Image (tube, grey):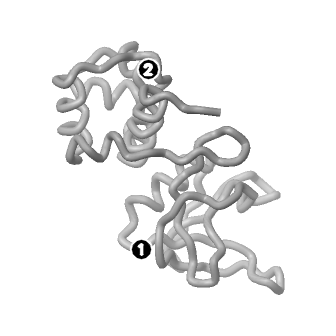
Amino acid sequence: MTISLRQRFGLRIKQLRVASGLSQEAFADHAGIARSYMSRLERGLGNPSLDAIEGLAEALDVDPQVLFEIVQPASSGEPSELVPYASDGSFFHRGLASPRDGTFRVGDKGAEIRLGSFEEALAYLERMPIAKWRRPNDAGNLGIVSAVRWAHASKHK
């Protein structure tokens, strides 16, 4: 399945907006554009002008070229997320949600927080100097791991 440039651009804008911690409406206000236009852009339906691209980049505090980074498609046909990997090759994924309440535990030991969605947790990890999250080890015990790199998820668990 081929993802159009508009769709890739929209996915990248959404990824960066979520990482900024802003709602679509708050970000649109910050960027000086209508929320409906922001929605169309994120869904790959809008055709942004160069001025709009420049404004979005400024609002995200990134170079405009960052908005065009390619989001690689996963085998499922959906775009893969850029996620943190630990030194053992494990990575942050949707399957790490607590079976008890569906939350994701992220943060430093003693200062962990629980977030209700994968997207919220991933955005929080992106803002950390070194991403840290809780996951089970080979023995099934929960422990905190630290990111050594960020890469596209090789598979969703």
Mark 1: secondary structure:
loop
Q: Along the horizontal axis of the image, is 85 left or right of 30?
A: right
Q: CA distance from mark 1 to mark 2?
A: 31 Å
**77 to 62, vertically: above or below:** above
Of residues 78 and 98, the one drawn nearer to the viewer in this rendering = 78
Find residue 36 and report its horizontal and vertical position in percent: 40, 13
Would you say the residues marked 1 and 2 are in contact, meaning their CB atoms lie under 8 Å apart? no
Dot 1 or dot 2: first in sequence order is 2
As shown in the figure, which amino acid type bears the numbered disc 1? Ile
Q: Along the horizontal axis of the image, is 59 left or right of 22?
A: left
Tell me the quadrant of the picture where the N terminus can be found: top right
Q: Along the horizontal axis of the image, is 146 left or right of 30?
A: right
Find residue 136 and report its horizontal and vertical position in percent: 74, 76
Of residues 101 and 63, the one drawn nearer to the viewer in this rendering = 63
Q: Quadrant of residue 32?
A: top left
Q: Which residue is mark 2?
A: 39
Q: Which residue is mark 1?
A: 130
Residue beneath the point at 49% across and 28% down: 4
Residue beneath the point at 16% across and 23% down: 51
Tell me the quadrant of the picture where the C terminus can be found: bottom right
Q: Residues within 10 Å of mark 1 (few under 14, many from 20)?
A: some
Find residue 27 and report its horizontal and vertical position in percent: 32, 31
**136 to 67, vertically: above or below:** below
